[in-house]
Image (cartoon, grey):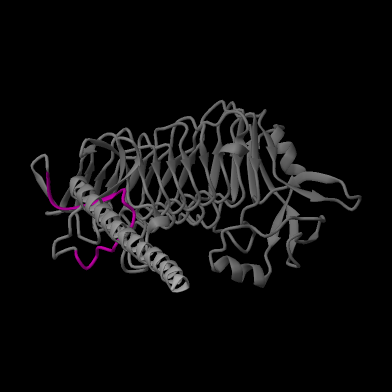
Amino acid sequence: MKIKIRNFKKYQTVVALLVINILSIGCSAQTGQNTTSAKDSRQQQESSRAGVVSSSDAVTELQAEDSNPAIVKKTNVVIQGRTYRYIEYETIRPGVIRLNYIVPQDEVLMVPSTLDGCNIEELGKDPESKNVEESELNITRGQKVKKVVIDGGVRTIKQDAFQGMDVSEVVLPKSLKQIKGYAFSSIGRDTYCKIQKINLDWVEKIESSAFMACRNLKKIRLRNEKVVVEHDAFYHCSRLTEIKLPKTLKGRLESGCFEGTGVKKIRWPRITGRVKKHIDVGLFSHCKSLKKVEFPKNQKHIYIPKGTFNGCKKLHKLVIPKGTGMVTYESHDCADNYTKSVTTLEFLDADTKVRGERYWDKKGKAKYDFITIKKIIAPKNSKAARYARKAKCIKKFTRVQLKALKKDDSYPFYFPEAAKTVKSTTGSALFTMGKVKLVERK
């Protein structure tokens, strides 16, 4: 009996321990469920306080789910008496927001300077955060807008922000410093940004292809001396007939930034210091309406990079004013059998030096006596005249080269190595060399 009683007590103890463990596990699970539901409740309360609401029927199809809690989405918002169908923004730092999308109710878009007590500094969604469906959507979600007025405070227009829009006029604030790439560019051949008028006076940086193929853009003015215009920024703006550059340039104009525009006249900016740092190749190549270039007087060095005026078939002569210390004229498409570029340089000052391209003589000595100009007009016995007497130029291009030029090849492909028949350093193309024609005047 004693043994049985002892075993019963032993089993009773084990059973009691099992019951206690089961009860503790159940309590833990219940506690976890309560905690989870409490978290969900808090998140819902925070979302409602932040003003996150579902979109209206008009924009539901365009709106994508976003897991970023910093993004706020609103519909039917009234700001300063104007109603907006849809607004989406996100915080980039305390008190400062990026306006991703703003869809007005009519065809005039007024972008405010503040929203929900925060300053708006950027327009357009960050490209890295876009999904595939949104990749070609601009700031108005594709809605047509005829005019855009941006209030003060905005500093940056993001990539694709106004891409392909039907807008004809954009009013920018003085606070704007940067326009990102493709901000006003076209989408394909048929859908292009129809902007006609925009003020770029105070902008410091216009990134590559920002206004590419804006066919209706007619004139621009850049007044900021430190402006940086990146490559192809205004590429193929065929009706852009007026381009006003800063009187003094301390920034940079990059390769082909005005290529293919309809500009008729250019006033070259005054550049001091290291000129090659401020200006790049092919700036006005294939501007088929360009007839005249005015250079500033009393400039120490006028630097004309490779291909600057290639394909400018109406621009036949460049006049270098008095007081110019030196002119560097790099490779351009010019020969007796191809004249769709500058063919003549005229110098008004007897003391202006000239520098063309290098070539190497039979002894391997580098010289600067090769220039892609057919004729030089200069005062008698001037430095330019003395240069022209010994300088060489291209007389004929080969059939292969002419075929490439007909395709509007913007960049020159020849760097001479000999005096008569020359082999290119970048390929096997040959061309014939000859003497530059000199016209001396009293």
Residue lying at the far right of the rendered structure: 363
Q: Nearer the viewer, residue 441 or 259?
A: 259
Q: Position of residue 282 (x, y in %)?
A: 55, 51
Q: Position of residue 11 (x, y in %)?
A: 42, 70
Q: Position of residue 154 (x, y in %)?
A: 31, 38
Say if residue 168 shows up in the picture. Answer: no
Q: Nearer the viewer, residue 50 or 28?
A: 28
Left or right: residue 26 versus residue 358 is: left
Q: Is residue 65 magenta?
A: yes
The region drawn magenta spans 60-78
Across the whole image, how many numbered discs are drawn on residues?
A: 0
Q: Residue at x 18, y 50 (%)?
A: 48
In this rendering, the answer to whether 116 lies above or below 258 is: above
Q: Nearer the viewer, residue 123 or 203?
A: 123
Q: Residue at x 8, y 42 (%)?
A: 81
In this rendering, the answer to whether 438 lies above or below 17 is: above
Which corner quadrant holds the N terminus?
bottom left
Q: Is residue 400 magenta?
A: no
Q: Position of residue 198 (x, y in %)?
A: 29, 44
Q: Residue at x 70, y 32 (%)?
A: 382
Say if residue 22 shows up in the picture. Answer: yes
In this rendering, the answer to whether 251 lies above or below 136 is: above
Which corner quadrant holds the C terminus?
top right
